[in-house]
Image (tube, coloured by chain):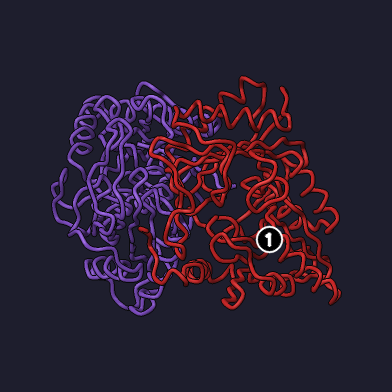
Chain colours: A red, B purple
Amino acid sequence: MKKFVNDPANFVAEMLEGVALANPEMLRYVPEYNLIYRADRPNPDKVSVVQGSGSGHEPAHIMAVGPGMLDAAAPGNVFSAPPVDYCYECIKRLASPKGVLVLINNYQGDRMNWDMAIEMAQAEGINVKSFIIDDDVAVQDSTHTVGRRGVAGNFFVIKACGAAAERGASLDELLRIAQKVNSQVRTMGVALTSCTPPAKGKPIFEIGDDEIEVGVGIHGEPGRRRDKLKPADAIVDELFDAVFNDLPFKSGDRVAVMINGLGGTPISELYVLYRRAAQRCKEKGLTIVRNYVGEYCTSLEMAGASLTLLRLDSELEDLLAAPAEVAVRIF
Amino acid sequence: MKKFVNDPANFVAEMLEGVALANPEMLRYVPEYNLIYRADRPNPDKVSVVQGSGSGHEPAHIMAVGPGMLDAAAPGNVFSAPPVDYCYECIKRLASPKGVLVLINNYQGDRMNWDMAIEMAQAEGINVKSFIIDDDVAVQDSTHTVGRRGVAGNFFVIKACGAAAERGASLDELLRIAQKVNSQVRTMGVALTSCTPPAKGKPIFEIGDDEIEVGVGIHGEPGRRRDKLKPADAIVDELFDAVFNDLPFKSGDRVAVMINGLGGTPISELYVLYRRAAQRCKEKGLTIVRNYVGEYCTSLEMAGASLTLLRLDSELEDLLAAPAEVAVRIF
């Protein structure tokens, strides 16, 4: 294992401390609960939008906390759901009279722990509801999933709900928006390499030097099949067709396109992928209104990428264009 | 070689096409010269700020084109200086009555080609000057360098000059600002792995599973020494001390801190490094005014990072805080 790490048991805590130190004004950090939240939250005039799942997917989701995005994030260990008491503490500290919306990617551990925490919070009179994201078209059920997995499409649910919450939308309104985004977004990924959780010290799966995993999950879950490495355009074509045909998208659709790096793939390669995705969109009659090329939902240092298409309408275009700020600075 | 690539000979062209397709309104792309430039340039009321060096360091420098940053970039092949005619074409197309500033990282190939292009342009009456960046403290001379190498500190020269140019600063004023930034910025990097240029197909250097290269260059140039992998904090300490003592920085300094990923290192690990860097700044009496954690100047998919410190004064703080936009979208 070749990583920048001290004691692997402290990896997540030290990362969170780094994020907090880098954003002393915007964020508060509660080490006992891995909780990262906006310093100016809860705001009684808006719904709090929160998320918590395993670490190792950064910038998702701790670095998606900020104005117009998440109000708080409570991650677990690498690839592990946050414990119930982390989830509960997150809801409790972010409780607002307008409510709390918990966005959950569809993994059994996350669902179970958040559901228990939500029940506990509701029993205390806190107004909290949850929404499940399941945008991965690769497989129907997966290693830790009944139904489809939630992957990079999560970003769009956060962005749309974060923007609407900032404008004062009600909890029910946010649930409607989350549902709309989730119903219109589709993703599939591919891995060129495996990755190594620091505390585990060895790769989560084995893959040959000439192999790729088509439809991989963000915790290394098996995809549709193991294939031989092939040209970038052929890989994009397979991801694109799977995603396009699933909704299905259709000529005339206005879309957002995301090429998401899985952690170890340089941005230069992501733009090679975007080039082909843009060609395919044009060929299919899709108008790309917004594009996102970079790292949004990763699997530690895994080399690989995912392709996401989101069908837009005027409401979603407006929400995606709304101002936002996160705990990852470019400038 | 496990990469998203079609024909390796087209890697740079396809990446540039992807960048252009992703930014149809902001950017223009001239494939014959690898030229990426702002659609609204040249602007006769401002100096054009341009850069061109080898590809493989993305987002540097093609994805640093945008308002408040570079006006144009003309990259060469991976780790190769742009040919003279690319440099010349870049200057010529960006020529403004107020002048053109070429920011050059200190590598012999880049300097030679840009110098020839600048002479050609000057012979035609174009007002163009250049500035050499050499922020890497690791070694005095290097494989392709007389004097120190230019690495991630380049970002701060671009940011400061880009902001000042946007406000109408003269060419001489920009040279003064570039000189100030370069004189106050220091960087050192470390590699955990090598990297593979697509057209070469094999790693640019060999490194053992338990080894790191301390002070590595961004083209894999040897650093100060080969060491055994050690805890993240110990690695940061070595980089920090080398950088801190070089200027030297001193207690009471206000600084910008950058933890720059070299391409294959996930952002989670970069925040583990930032945590220690922030601790060291505090211990040394440095006030961190701005921090930058992410990828700014990479070496393809190399796992590794660099640490940069920039001493600030009120002028530089103001320029770093100025609005900017680049061809890499977060939202």
Q: Chain of mark 1?
A: A
Q: Position of residue B168 (x, y in %)?
A: 43, 45
From the viewer's perspective, tell me whether residue A314 is left or right of residue B184.
right
As rendered, which of B89 and A47 lies closer to the eye?
Answer: A47
- Residue B24 seen by the camera: yes
From the viewer's perspective, tell me whether residue A312 is left or right of residue B319.
right
Q: Which residue is mark 1?
A: A110
From the viewer's perspective, tell me whether residue B282 is left or right of residue B243.
right
Q: Does residue A137 sit above or below A119 in this rendering?
A: above
**How many numbered markers are drawn?**
1
As rendered, which of B249 and A60 lies closer to the eye?
Answer: A60
As rendered, which of B190 and A141 lies closer to the eye?
Answer: A141
Q: Position of residue A179 (x, y in %)?
A: 79, 47
- For mark 1, give the secondary structure: helix
Answer with the quarter of the image where residue B44 lies: top left
Quarter holding the N terminus of chain A is bottom left
From the viewer's perspective, tell me whether residue B300 is left or right of residue A104.
left
Identified at 52% across, 33% down, the residue is A274
Q: Does residue B75 sit above or below A149 in this rendering?
A: above
What residue type is disc 1 on?
A: Asp
As rendered, which of B243 and B118 lies closer to the eye?
Answer: B243
